[in-house]
C-alpha cells in the first residue's frame, strides 16, 4: 500500500465510490416509487446526448459532453412522460419505447459522423475506463498534502465530488417532502407539497448523477448503483433513515471491492491484466443484493396492500 | 329579468368570501372528470363550521373525486374552493385529509410514529428540528385513537383497522379546523369504527368541522348531523332530518335501492 | 435509392435476402410475442433478458476456445446467450416473488449485474486472446455486415421457428393477457403460461442478437405493440398489428442498411419502428394525441358552456374566465358580460332541459340510461318526442320556463 497504490488506485477508487453514492441516494426513492428503471432509461440516452454534443460543438471536451448528456436525459424524461400521458401507455413500455429509440438514434449518428479520430465510442459510454483515471503526479501518501501534486488530480474527481455533494445536500434538504410524497402522494398534495415538481426534481437529480457517473465510469455503474444498493438496503431494515445508510454502505463496498477485485483479482488467479472495473463493481453490487435477498432480515413482504394489485376503490 | 341583475361579475377574492364567513368549506361550480366522463358536475356546496357531515351516494357517484378535486389532489375542470373563508392555497394549514387506506403501499419502510409525524410537516418545514415535544404530541395523537402502544411498530404489521387509526392520528397531529375523511369506516372492525367515531365527535365538540365520504346508509343518522347526497350532481344537502328523505335517496340511488329499503333507512326511529 | 429497391426486392445477394427475410420473420415474431408482454404490463422484463445474454456469449466463447475451437460459432454463442438469459429471467422471477422488492427493481438489478459481469468476461477474453474477440462486440449493437451464410440461415430459421411457436401459443397467451383471473379459474396454469411467454421472448431476443444487438432488441419487442395499441381495442388484433409493424420494420430496416452499409441494421430497424410509433401516437383516429386533444377541449368547452348557461338562467354571477370566454365567443353574452338576446334564449332552453331531466329522473328512476345522467347530454338525445311531451306536462307553470 505505498506510492503505487496512491498513484494508480486511490483516485479510481475515490471516483468509483463517489459515483456509487451519488447514484444510490436518489436510487432509494426511485426504488420505493417503482421507478427503478428510470435510471436505466436515463443511462441509455447518455450516448445520443454526447454524440449530439460532439456533432454540434465538434469537440470532445468534458463540458459539451456533460451538457449534451444532461440535455438528452431531460428530453428523455419529457418524452417518457409525454408517451405515458398522451398515449396512455404504461410507464414501463413508455420507457422502453423512448430509451431504445434515442439510443438507436445515438448509434446511427455515431456511425454516420467522423468520430474515428476521437475517443468516442459505444463501449466507452457503456463501461467507461475507471482504470485510466490515475494520479500521475502522486509519489506517495505525502502527495495528499502537496499542492503541486494535488493540482494534478484527475478533473473527474472534482466533478464527481461536486455532484455527490450536491446530491447529498438535496437529499438532506428535501428529505421530509420526499419521504411524505413517496409514501402518500395525495396526502402530500394536501400539505401543499408540489408533488409533480418534486417527482421531476428527483428524476432530474438522478439524471445529473447518471451523467456525472457516466463521465467518470460509464453508464453500467450508474444503472447498477441506482438499483442494487437501495434494493439490498430495503431488505436489511424497516426504516427509511437506516435504509439510506445501508445503501451508502453497500455502494461504497461495491465500489471498493469491485475495483480491487478487478485490478488484483486476475493477478491472484495467475492472470496478467486487470478486467473491467465498472463491470466488476456492478457484479459485486449484484452479489451483495443476492446475499441480502437470501439472508436479509427484512427480505419478505409484509404490507397487506400492494400498489400494483388493483384495490376496489370508490371514487 | 333586468340586465343589471344578470351582469356578470369578474372573479375576485372578495366576491368569493362574501357570504361564507360562517362556513368551513365552500365549493362553487366544481366539475371534474376522468377522461371525458364527468365524475362530478357543477357542484356547489357550503358546509357550516362545527358540523359533522357525510357525503353519501352510490358507487361511482364521484364522492371521493369531489374530495380530491376540492383539495387539488386531482385537477378540476372548473370551480373554486375556499376553506374557513380563505382560498384553499392560503388555508393549507387548516385542512387535514385522511385518504383511503388502500391508496398507499403499507410495505413502505416506516414505523407508526414516522407516519404520524408526517402530519407535523407544515409546522416543521423542510429543515425544522424535530424536538421531543413533537414526538410527545405524535404519541398523544396515537393515544387518542388507542394506538399509543404501537408507536414503534412497523406499519406493514398493522391490521386494516389499525392502519385507519394511524391515518386518523396523522390528521389529528395536523391540528386542523377542517377534517376531510375518505371512507374512514371502509373495511375496519367494529371496535375501530367506534373509536374513530368517538374521536370525530370530540373534534366536533371542540368546534372543528368533519366531513366524511360515507357508504353505510344505516349509520348516517347516528353519526352525522348534516348530509350531502350526490350522484355526479348534488342531489341535496342540509341537516340530516330534512335531507335524509325517501325522495332524496331515491333521486340519488335510483333503482339501486329497493323502495322498502329506502323507507326503512330514512325513518329509522319510526 | 436503387440499391434500396434492390435490397427490398431481395435481389441484393443471397445472404442479404436471407437476412432480410430472417429479420422480417423475427420482427413479426417479436411484435406478436411482445404484445402479450405489453398487455401483461411487463414489457421491460425483455430488457433484463436481453442484457442477461452478454455473460452467456462470453462464457460460450471461453468454453469453445477451451475445447479447441475458434469460439466464433454463432449457434454456440447463441446457446450460451440463451442459457444466461434464462438464468436472468429466473432471477427476476425469484426476486419479485420471494422478496419484498417489486419487479421493476428486480429487472434493473438483473440487467445491470448480468451486463456488468458480461463486460468483465469480455475484458477477460480480450486479455486472453487479443484480436480474436472482435466478433463479440457485434452482439452489443448487432451487425449484418460480413455475415456468413451459416449465420444468415440460423437467423432465418430461428425467426421462422419463433413465429411458429408464437402462433401455436397464441390462444393461452391471449387468454392470460386479456383476463388472467378468468384464465386461472378455467384451469390454465398461469405461471406456466407466463414462463412459456417469457421463453418465447427469450428465443426472439437470442435470435435477434446478431442482427439488432442486445441493447436494441427490446425495441423490437416493446415498440410494435405500443404502436399497435393506438389502432385497436382488441387483444388479438393488437398482436396481429404489432406483428405486422415488427415485420415491416425488420424487412425495411435490413433493406436500408444493406443499401447503405454504413448504417447499422439494428439502429435502423429500431428507428423504422419508432417512426411508425410516432405516427400512430399523433394521428391514430381514436386514441391518437390529436384526436384526444380535440375531444378533451370540446368536452371542457361543453362543460363550461352548460354551466355558464345554467348560471345565466338562474341569474347567478359567473366568475370563471374560461366560461366567460366560451359564452362571449358564441355571442351569448356581450363583452361587458351582459347576456344577449340569443344568450337569454339559449339559457332558457338549457334551463328547460335541466328541468326536464329532473322530472325524467323522478319518472324513470329504474332506467339506468336516465339515472346515469352526465349533466351534458340534451334530453332529446335520449328520449322520444312524446316522452318529452309527457315530461313537459309535469313542469310546474310557476317555473317560468316557456318554449
Image: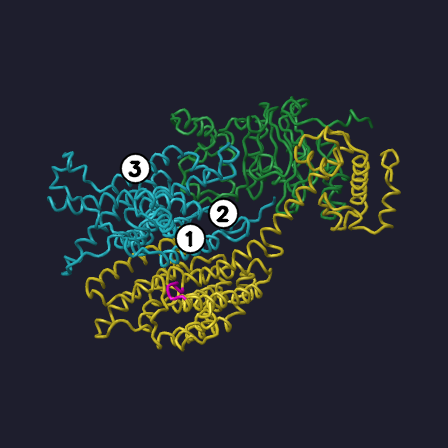
The Cα atoms of the two marked residues, 1 and 2, are separated by: 17 Å
Left or right placement of residue A125 versus residue A86 in this view:
left
The Cα atoms of the two marked residues, 3 and 1, are separated by: 30 Å
Q: Which quadrant holds residue A112? A: bottom left
Q: As displayed, is residue C280 above or below residue C210?
A: above
Residue annotated with mark 3: A162
Q: Position of residue A210 (x, y in %)?
A: 35, 46
Q: Which quadrant holds residue C134? A: bottom left
> Closer to the observer: label 3 or label 1?
3
First in sequence: mark 3 or mark 2? Answer: 2
Chain assignment, label 3: A
Chain assignment, label 1: C
Q: Colour of chain A?
A: cyan
Disc 2 is placed on an element classified as helix
Q: In front: C253, or A37? A: C253
Q: Which mark is residue C104?
A: 1
Question: Residue at the location (42% across, 26% down)?
Answer: B134
Q: Residues within 10 Å of mark 1 (few under 14, many from 20)?
A: many
Q: Which mark is residue A81?
A: 2
The Cα atoms of the two marked residues, 3 and 2, are separated by: 29 Å
Q: Colour of chain C?
A: yellow
Amino acid at each position: 500500500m505505498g506510492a503505487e497504490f496512491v498513484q494508480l488506485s486511490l483516485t479510481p477508487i475515490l471516483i468509483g465510490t463517489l459515483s456509487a453514492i451519488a447514484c444510490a441516494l436518489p436510487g432509494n426513492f426511485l426504488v420505493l416509487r417503482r421507478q427503478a428503471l428510470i435510471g436505466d432509461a436515463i443511462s441509455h440516452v447518455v450516448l445520443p446526448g454526447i454524440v449530439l454534443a460532439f456533432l454540434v460543438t465538434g469537440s470532445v471536451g468534458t463540458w459539451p459532453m456533460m451538457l449534451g448528456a444532461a440535455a438528452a436525459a431531460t428530453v428523455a424524461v419529457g418524452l417518457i412522460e409525454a408517451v405515458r400521458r398522451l398515449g396512455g401507455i404504461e410507464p414501463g413500455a413508455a420507457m422502453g419505447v423512448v430509451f431504445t429509440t434515442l439510443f438507436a438514434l445515438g448509434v446511427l449518428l455515431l456511425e454516420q459522423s467522423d468520430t474515428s479520430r476521437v475517443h468516442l465510442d459505444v463501449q466507452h459510454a457503456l463501461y467507461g475506463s475507471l482504470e485510466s483515471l490515475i494520479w500521475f503526479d502522486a509519489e506517495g501518501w505525502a502527495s495528499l498534502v502537496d499542492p503541486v501534486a494535488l493540482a494534478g488530480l484527475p478533473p473527474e474527481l472534482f466533478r464527481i465530488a461536486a455532484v455527490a455533494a450536491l446530491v447529498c445536500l438535496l437529499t438532506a434538504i428535501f428529505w421530509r417532502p420526499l419521504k411524505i410524497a413517496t409514501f402518500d402522494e395525495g396526502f402530500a398534495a394536501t400539505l401543499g407539497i408540489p408533488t409533480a415538481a418534486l417527482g421531476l426534481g428527483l428524476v432530474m437529480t438522478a439524471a445529473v448523477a447518471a451523467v456525472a457517473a457516466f463521465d467518470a465510469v460509464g453508464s453500467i455503474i450508474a444503472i447498477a448503483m441506482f438499483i442494487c444498493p437501495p434494493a439490498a438496503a430495503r431488505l436489511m431494515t424497516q426504516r427509511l433513515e437506516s435504509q439510506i445508510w445501508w445503501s451508502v454502505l453497500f455502494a461504497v463496498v461495491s465500489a471498493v471491492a469491485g475495483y480491487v477485485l478487478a485490478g488484483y483479482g486476475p493477478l491472484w488467479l495467475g492472470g496478467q491484466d486487470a478486467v473491467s472495473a465498472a463491470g466488476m463493481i456492478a457484479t459485486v453490487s449484484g452479489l451483495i443484493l443476492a446475499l441480502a435477498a437470501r439472508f436479509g432480515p427484512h427480505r419478505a413482504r409484509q404490507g397487506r396492500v400492494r400498489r400494483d394489485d388493483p384495490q376496489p376503490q370508490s371514487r | 329579468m333586468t340586465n343589471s341583475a344578470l351582469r356578470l361579475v369578474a372573479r375576485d377574492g372578495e366576491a368569493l368570501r362574501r357570504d361564507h364567513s360562517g362556513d368551513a368549506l365552500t365549493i362553487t361550480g366544481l366539475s371534474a372528470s376522468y377522461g371525458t366522463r364527468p365524475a362530478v358536475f357543477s357542484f356547489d356546496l357550503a358546509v357550516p363550521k362545527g358540523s359533522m357531515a357525510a357525503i353519501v351516494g352510490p358507487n361511482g357517484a364521484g364522492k371521493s373525486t369531489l374530495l380530491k378535486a376540492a383539495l387539488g389532489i386531482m385537477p378540476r375542470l372548473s370551480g373554486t374552493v375556499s376553506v374557513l373563508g380563505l382560498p384553499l392555497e392560503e388555508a393549507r394549514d387548516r385542512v387535514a385529509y385522511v385518504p383511503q387506506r388502500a391508496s398507499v403501499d403499507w410495505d413502505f419502510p416506516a414505523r407508526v410514529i414516522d407516519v404520524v409525524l408526517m402530519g407535523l410537516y407544515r409546522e416543521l418545514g423542510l429543515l425544522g428540528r424535530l424536538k421531543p415535544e413533537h414526538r410527545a404530541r405524535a404519541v398523544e395523537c396515537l393515544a387518542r385513537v388507542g394506538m399509543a402502544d404501537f408507536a414503534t411498530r412497523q406499519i406493514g404489521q398493522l391490521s386494516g383497522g389499525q392502519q385507519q387509526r394511524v391515518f386518523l392520528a396523522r390528521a389529528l397531529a395536523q391540528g386542523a379546523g377542517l377534517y376531510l375523511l375518505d371512507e374512514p369506516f371502509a373495511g375496519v372492525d367494529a371496535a375501530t369504527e367506534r373509536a374513530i367515531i368517538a374521536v370525530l365527535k370530540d373534534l366536533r365538540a371542540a368546534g372543528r368541522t368533519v366531513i366524511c365520504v360515507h357508504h353505510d346508509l344505516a349509520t348516517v343518522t347516528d353519526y352525522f348531523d348534516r348530509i350531502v347526497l350526490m350522484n355526479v350532481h348534488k342531489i341535496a344537502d342540509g341537516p340530516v332530518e330534512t335531507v335524509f328523505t325517501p325522495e332524496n335517496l331515491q333521486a340519488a340511488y335510483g333503482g339501486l335501492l329497493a323502495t322498502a329499503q329506502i323507507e326503512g333507512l330514512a325513518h329509522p326511529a319510526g | 435509392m436503387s440499391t434500396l429497391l434492390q435490397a427490398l426486392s431481395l435481389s441484393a445477394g443471397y445472404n442479404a435476402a436471407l437476412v432480410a427475410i430472417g429479420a422480417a420473420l423475427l420482427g413479426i415474431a417479436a411484435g406478436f410475442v411482445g404484445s402479450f408482454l405489453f398487455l401483461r404490463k411487463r414489457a421491460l422484463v425483455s430488457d433484463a433478458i436481453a442484457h442477461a445474454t452478454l455473460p452467456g456469449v462470453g462464457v460460450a466463447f471461453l468454453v469453445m476456445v477451451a475445447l479447441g475451437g475458434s469460439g466464433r460459432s454463432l449457434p454456440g454463442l447463441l446457446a450460451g446467450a440463451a442459457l444466461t438469459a434464462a438464468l436472468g429471467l429466473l432471477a427476476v422471477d425469484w426476486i419479485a416473488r420471494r422478496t419484498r422488492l417489486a419487479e421493476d427493481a428486480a429487472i434493473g438489478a438483473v440487467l445491470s449485474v448480468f451486463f456488468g459481469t458480461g463486460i468483465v468476461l469480455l475484458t477477460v477474453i480480450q486479455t486472453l486472446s487479443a484480436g480474436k474477440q472482435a466478433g463479440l462486440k457485434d452482439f452489443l449493437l448487432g451487425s449484418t455486415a460480413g455475415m456468413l451464410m451459416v449465420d444468415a440461415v440460423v437467423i432465418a430459421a430461428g425467426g421462422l421457428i419463433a413465429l411458429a411457436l408464437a402462433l401455436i401459443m397464441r390462444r393461452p397467451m391471449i387468454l392470460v393477457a386479456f383476463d388472467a383471473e378468468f384464465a386461472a379459474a378455467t384451469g390454465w396454469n398461469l405461471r406456466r403460461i407466463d414462463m412459456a411467454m417469457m421463453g418465447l421472448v427469450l428465443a426472439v431476443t437470442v435470435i435477434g442478437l446478431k442482427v439488432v444487438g442486445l441493447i436494441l432488441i427490446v425495441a423490437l419487442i416493446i415498440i410494435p405493440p405500443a404502436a399497435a395499441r393506438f389502432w385497436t381495442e382488441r387483444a388479438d388484433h393488437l398482436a396481429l398489428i404489432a406483428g405486422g409493424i415488427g415485420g415491416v420494420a425488420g424487412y425495411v430496416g435490413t433493406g436500408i442498411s444493406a443499401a447503405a452499409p454504413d448504417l447499422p441494421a439494428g439502429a435502423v430497424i429500431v428507428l423504422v419502428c419508432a417512426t411508425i410509433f410516432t405516427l400512430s401516437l399523433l394521428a391514430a383516429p381514436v386514441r391518437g394525441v390529436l384526436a384526444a386533444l380535440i375531444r378533451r377541449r370540446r368536452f371542457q368547452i361543453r362543460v363550461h358552456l352548460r354551466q355558464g348557461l345554467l348560471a345565466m338562467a338562474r341569474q347567478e354571477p359567473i366568475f370563471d374566465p374560461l366560461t366567460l370566454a366560451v359564452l362571449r365567443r358564441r355571442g351569448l353574452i356581450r363583452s361587458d358580460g351582459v347576456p344577449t338576446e340569443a344568450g337569454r334564449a339559449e339559457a332558457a332552453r338549457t334551463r328547460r332541459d335541466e328541468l326536464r331531466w329532473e322530472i325524467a329522473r323522478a319518472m324513470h328512476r329504474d332506467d339506468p340510461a336516465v339515472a346515469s345522467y352526465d349533466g351534458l347530454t340534451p334530453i332529446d338525445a335520449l328520449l322520444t318526442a312524446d316522452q318529452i311531451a309527457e315530461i313537459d306536462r309535469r313542469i310546474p307553470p310557476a317555473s317560468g320556463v316557456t318554449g
